[in-house]
Image: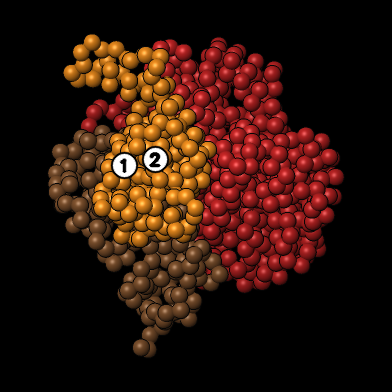
Chain colours: A orange, B brown, C red
Amino acid sequence: MSRRVRIATTSLAGCFGCHTSFLDMDERLLRLAGQVELDRSPLTDRKQIRHCDIGLIEGGLCNSENIELLRRFRACCTTLVALGACAVNGGIPALRNRYTLEECLREAYLEGAGIENPQIPDDPELPRLLENIHPIHELVTVDYSLPGCPPPADAIWALLQDLIAGREPVPPLELIRYD
Amino acid sequence: MNGPTFTIDGRSVPFTEGQSIIQAAREAGIYIPHLCYHPEFRPHGSCRLCVVEAGGRSVPACSTPAVAGQQVRNRTERLDRMRRTLVELLFVEGNHFCPACPKSGNCKLQAVGYWLRMLDTPFPYLFPRRELDASHHDVLLDRDRCIFCELCVRASREVDRKNLFAIGGKGTRCRLLVNSPDGRLGSSGLSLGDRALQVCPTGALLPRKGAFHVPVGRRLYDGRSIAESDE
Amino acid sequence: MMQGAAPVGESWITGLAATCGGDATALLPILHEAQERFAYIPRAVMQQIARTLSLPLAQVEAVVEFYHFFSSQPRGRYDIFFSSCVIDRLRGGDESARLLCERLRVTPGGSRADGVVSVRHTSCTGMCDQGPALLVNGHAIAGLDRERSEQMASLIERRIPLREWPRGLFRIAGNIRRSGPLLSGEIPPGAALQRALSLGRKGLLERLERSGLRGRGGAGFPTALKWRACREAPGEHYVVCNADEGEPGTFKDRELLRRHAHAVFEGMTLAAWVIGARRGFLYLRGEYRFLLQHLEQVLAERRGMGLLGERIGGGRDFGFDITIRLGAGAYICGEESALLESLQGNLPRPRNRPPYPVTHGLFGQPTVVNNVESFAAAAHIALNGDRWLTARGTEHSRGSKLLSISGDCARPGIYEFAFGTPLEEILDACGARDLLGVQMGGPSGNWITPAEFQRSLAFEDLSSAGALMVFGRERDLLEIVHGFSRFFAHESCGFCTPCRVGTGLQARLVEKLCLGRGCDRDLERLRSLGELMSATSHCGLGQSAPNPVLTTLAAEPQRYRKRLNSTAFTPDFQPLRELRSCGRRE
C-alpha cells in the first residue's frame, strides 16, 4: 500500500466510551500510528472527513445531525464499522424508545425532579430529534459490527489488524461481548 | 456397548429407548444449542434453537426421539446460520439492553449469541413497549427481557407447585401473565427460593438484591462458553 | 384468592358449566356467554369462571386474550368486525368499512365514547363469494354495499336490538355453482349407518380403504388408515370434526354444513362406530355462528331418529353423541392439535408431534380428527360403495373435491370438480379471464401463474384444501402478498420464535416494498427469513407463512424489481418523517 490506511471515527448517540476503549489499546496505539493515518475523529479534532479506508461509528441515531454525519461517513468510507452496542442495537439511549419523545422531553425539562426554570430548549441551532433511537444499520449499509459496551480494546485491535491486513475480520470468541 | 446408537455429525451416540436426540447428545457430551429446553422439564419446543437435521428434515432435538441408526447433523453451516438468525430474532423482538442488565454475564440468551458468533443483525429492531412489574418486594419482572421459553411457567407448575405464570396474548403481542388476583407479581406468592425464578434464562425474572455483586470476569459465561457450562 | 365483589350472580356460570360437563371443555361456551352478556369479559367474571372450572385465573385470562372475539376490555353494544381478507378488500371492503365508520363516527380499532359501537378487523370470515362481509355481535352480514351500510348505521343509531333487524340483512347466499356426487348426492338419515352395520366394522374399513379416500382438509392422509390406527389404539376414543374453516378464501364447509349436515354427522357416527367412540365434537369456527341453530336442530332430529344417543341403530353396544363447540376467531385452531387444545379449554397451540391424535388426541386419548368434507364423503362411500369415489379422479387422488372460488371471476362460489381437472377448465367454469394468477389453497398455498394453468387439481399436482383465489390482470401482486403477510402476522400464535417474530418482520418488509421504498437487500432478507420460517417453525402456520412471498418472488421476480426504490440500500425507517423539533410546534 502506497499510503497508510486512513481511518475516521465519530460518535453519534453514544458516550465516547468506545473511543475510550480505543485509547485503551495503550502502547499498541504507537504501532497503530505507524500503520494508519487518523482522519476526522474526536481524537484529532479534525472537522472535515476525506475519503477513508475505514470508518468507525460509535453510537446510534438520535437526531438530524447524526443522520447527516452517518450518511457522510458512509459516502466517504470504503469500510464502515458499527463500533459498540449503541451503533449495533441502539444501546442505552434506545431505552427512551419505550416513551414518546414528548414524554421524554417533559420529564427531562419540565416535570422531572429538581428542575428550575422549566423549559424545553428550542434554539434553532439545536438539531432536530428523532422520535425513536435507531441502530445505524437501519439507515446505511454496515460492513462489520463489533458489539460491546464498550468493545474490549483487544477486540478493536484485532478488528483493525484484520482490516489493515485485508483479512475478513473474525473476532476471537472470548472477545465477543454485548456488555 | 450393546444398546442402540445413532450418530451426530458422524459420531456414534448411544441412547435408551424414549430418549430425545438432545438427551442422548447431552449424555454423550455433545452440545446442541437451546434456550427453552431444560433437562428437569418436559420439552417445550418453542425456541427452535436445537434444530438439527434428521431424516432429511429440520427437527427440534428436544422433542424428537432418537432413532437407532439415524444420522443426525448438528454443526452444519446452514444450521448454525439459522440458529444465529433465531437468536437475532429474539434480540430484535424484545428490549435486551445487556449493558444495563444485572443478568449480563450469566444470561443464556447472551451466551448462546456469543457461541453462535452473533455480532449484529440485518433486521430492524422492534422496540416493543412492554409492562414492567416492580410490585414484588424481592423480585423484578422485566417483560422486556422475556423470550417466552415458559421455563418459569413449567417450573412454577411442576416443581414449586404454585402455577404462577402463563403466556397470554398472541403473536408479537405475547406477554408473560402472572396468575394472581390482580395479575401482579407482588400478590402472587412467588418467593426467592422458587425454581421458577432460578430457571429464567434471561433477566426477565430477577432477584432485586445482589445485582452486579459478581465482578465482570468472574461471571458464569465470562471465562467459558455456554457449551462448556451447559446445564 | 378471590378479591372484589362479583358484578353479577354467578349462577349462570355454574349452570352452564354443569351442562357442559363441568370441566375445562366448558371454558369456550362460558366465555362466549360472558362476552355476549357484558360485551367484554370483566376480570371479576374471569375469576368466577376460573373458580367454577378449577382453572388458574391466568389460563382463563390467556385464553380470553388469544381469541379475536373475546375481549378483556369493554366493547361496544354493537361490536363490529370487518373481514380484512384480501378478497373482501378487492371487492371494496375498505370502502364499505370507511363508509360505515364515517356514518357511525367511530374509528376502526376503536370504540365510540358512548359505548354503543366498536369496530375492529378480523381475518377472512368465510364470505369471499359474497363479500365484503362483516360480523356484528358474531352474526355475519355479507354483500356490504352502500345501501346495507346505511341501513346498518341507521339500525345502530336507533339502538334497534340485533334480533329485530330485518332478516334479509343476515341472508347468506349458497352460491353452489357446480355439483358433483358430494353436493348433489342425498343420504337418507341413517341409511349409510344401516349399510355399515350390515358390512361390519372390518367391512366398512375395507370399503373405505378400497376407495382410497384421502383427508380433504389439506394434508391428504388416507382416511381408512387413520380410523384403523385410532381403533387399534387403547383408551377412550373420540371423534372430532374440524369445521374451523379458517383458511382465507375457503367457504365450502359453510354450505356442506348448511345443506348436508346429516351426511357430515352420519360420517362422524360411522367413525365413532368403527373406533368405538362414545363422544364426538364438531368444532365450528366462530364466524359460522349463524349455522349453529340449524346444526343443533339436525342433531336433535338425529337423536329423535335414534341415530345419536344410546343404542344407535337398535344395537345395544353402540352409543354416541355429538357436541358442537363454537370457536372464537383464531386461524390456528384449524390445525388439528391446536383445535384439540382449544376444545380442552387450553391455549390453542399446536402440540409437539409425535404422538399424533390417532393415539393421543383429545384429553390424550385416541381421536379421529377429520375435515367436514371427509366425513361427508365417508358416509357416501359407506352407503354407495367405493365406486362412488373411484369412478372419478386420478390414481392418487380419487373422487371429487369441493373448491371455494373467489375473487376476479364472473361466478364466485362453490364448485365440485373431479380430481385431475385442469385448472384452465376450472377457471373457465367460473368465468375467470385475463388473470394475473391464482392463489391455490389460500395464503398458505401457492401462487400459480397463467403459464401453469394446464396443471391439474390433485394431491400430486395442485393441492388445495378448498380455496382458489382468482386475481385479474389489473391487480397489484405486491398488495396481494402484503395482505397475506399481514394475515400471518395477525394469526401467528406466538409460540415459536421463527413464526412469532418472522411473520411480523415479513409483513413489515413486504409493506416497505409496497410503499416503493424497498431495495435488493429487502428481497434477500425476505428470502432468508422465509427459509428460516419454513425450515424451523413449530407447525404448518409458520412453515407455510412465507409461501406467498417465496412463490411469487420465484415466479415473478420482475414484479418485485419494478417496485424497488434502489438496488443498493434503502433505510428501514423514514428519517425525515421521524424528526421533531424540540420546543417548537411544527
Same chain for the residues under marks 2 and 1 in the image: yes
Q: Residues within 10 Å of mark 2 (few under 14, many from 20)?
A: many
**Residue C336 visible in rendering:** no
Q: Residue at x 43, y 55 (%)?
A: A164
Q: Residue at x 38, y 85 (%)?
A: B3
Q: Chain of mark 1?
A: A
Q: Chain of mark 2?
A: A
Percent x, y of residue A123: 37, 14
Along the line of sight, which residue is nearer the eye, A69 or C302? Answer: A69
CB under 8 Å between discs 2 and 1: yes
Instruction: Name the residue beneath numbered marker 2.
Output: A9
At mark 1, the secondary structure is helix
Judge whether A166 appears above or below C324 on screen.
Answer: below
Query: Which mark is on residue A19?
Result: 1
Residue reaching furthest to the front: A2
Q: Residue at x 44, y 26 (%)?
A: A64
Please name the amino acid that badge 2 sits on: Thr
- Locate the C terminus of chain B and report the quarter of the image it occupies: bottom left
Q: Give the mark count.
A: 2
Tell me where residue A39 sits by quadrant: top left
